[in-house]
Image (spheres, rainbow, N blue to C red):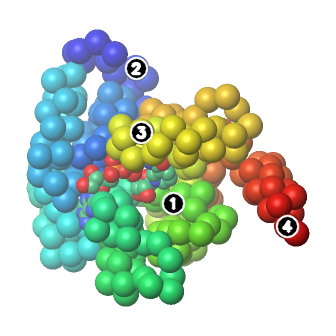
């Protein structure tokens, strides 16, 4: 996209106020940029001040409106203050995309074998991924007097098991249930709540973290030849946040290039290999 206000393609969010958490990088940054490009004033919230500032600056450089907010979503006081700061500037919130997750090496990187799992890793995963989403909803819904749209970030890790990342997967599964509760509690006030569940999204961090072999494994699991990019997820998040989705609530939409839509060929092949090598 080139710079300037003409980047605003459809104006689906003209005059609206959006809060995006974990917007300092990756998918959150792409969602914040898309919401702003379509007219929203965006609260760009992240634990890392530098990330929040850089996403907000990039939005402003394209003619959009953004406010950088530094906040740990697991801390209720910080969440309250961040929402209050956005409301003080823009009067209300129309869209919440709760996207932040603890994906650093100290938490996600140590969420491996359950038998040796440090309980602190489990707790921090739940604190950020689950309690963080709850706190954002709790403090944002009162700022949605005319209704609003909430999009929570789950994952395909909520829908299938794996040999690692039990804490992460459980936190993302809980968010699917939480989505239905929020949709039920606030539907009569015109607040919708949905979740998105991506498979591997090729953020810069994911591309750095995965080996060629791991990327090839993921490619073999997909039906489509192409992986999801942050912009693909932003398309779905913005659709769910827009009036085009006004009758959709309580749902979780998978976005995975067909990863979960078929029999798990990769696993089947592994079983075949194991059986072939059995004595
Ligand atoms: N990338 C993928 O393949 C993938 C797949 C499925 C789901 N997801 C989900 O998408 C979301 C974004 O992931 P990403 O790949 O863009 O990762 P990312 O690391 O680029 O983004 C996560 C952001 O959250 C922020 N954050 C972490 N802890 C925080 C806290 N306590 N308070 C506020 N902000 C905090 C980080 O600073 C970071 O900017 C996550 O919820 C992740 O679980 C990602």
Circle 3 Cα neighbour tier, 10 Å, few/some/many (<14 / 14–19 / ≥20):
few
What's the residue at 31%, 34% (across, down)?
A: 33
Q: Quarter of the image holding residue 6?
A: top left
**SS for callout 1:** loop
User: Mark 1 against mark 3, which lies toward the viewer?
Assistant: 3
Can you tell me which quadrant of the image ligand 1 is in? bottom left
Q: Residue at x 63, y 44 (%)?
A: 217
Q: Nearer the viewer, residue 78 or 169?
A: 169
Label 2: how many residues lie within 10 Å, few (<14), some (14-19) or many (20+)? few
- Kindly indicate the quadrant of the structure image that contains residue 134: bottom left
- Between disc 2 and disc 1, the foreground one is 1
Labels 2 and 1: the sequence-earlier one: 2
Tell me where residue 115 appears, x and y as whole percent: 50, 86
> Which residue corresponds to mark 2?
9
The local secondary structure at tag 2 comes to loop
Earlier sequence position, callout 3 versus callout 2: 2
Secondary structure under tag 3 reads: helix
Closer to us: mark 1 or mark 4?
Answer: 4
């Amino acid at each position: 996209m080139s710079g300037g206000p003409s980047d605003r393609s459809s104006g689906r969010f003209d005059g609206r106020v959006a809060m995006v958490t974990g917007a300092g990088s990756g998918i959150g940054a792409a969602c914040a940029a898309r919401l702003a490009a379509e007219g929203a004033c965006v609260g760009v919230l992240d634990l890392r001040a530098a990330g929040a500032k850089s996403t907000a600056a990039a939005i402003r450089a394209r003619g959009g409106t953004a406010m950088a907010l530094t906040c740990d979503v697991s801390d209720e006081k910080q969440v309250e203050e961040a929402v209050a700061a956005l409301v003080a500037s823009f009067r209300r919130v129309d869209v919440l995309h709760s996207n932040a997750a603890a994906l650093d090496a100290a938490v996600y990187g140590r969420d491996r074998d359950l038998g040796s799992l440090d309980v602190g890793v489990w707790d921090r995963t739940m604190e950020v991924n689950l309690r963080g989403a709850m706190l954002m909803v709790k403090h944002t819904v009162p700022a949605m007097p005319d209704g609003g749209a909430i999009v929570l970030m789950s994952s395909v890790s909520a829908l299938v098991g794996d040999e690692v990342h039990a804490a992460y997967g459980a936190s993302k599964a809980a968010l699917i249930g939480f989505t239905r509760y929020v949709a039920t509690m606030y539907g009569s006030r015109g607040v919708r709540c949905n979740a998105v569940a991506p498979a591997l999204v090729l953020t810069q961090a994911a591309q750095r973290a995965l080996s060629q072999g791991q990327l090839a494994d993921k490619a073999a699991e997909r039906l489509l030849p192409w992986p999801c990019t942050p912009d693909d997820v932003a398309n779905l998040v913005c659709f769910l946040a827009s009036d085009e989705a006004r009758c959709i609530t309580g749902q979780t939409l998978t976005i995975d290039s067909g990863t979960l839509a078929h029999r798990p060929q990769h696993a089947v092949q592994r079983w075949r290999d194991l059986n072939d090598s059995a004595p």
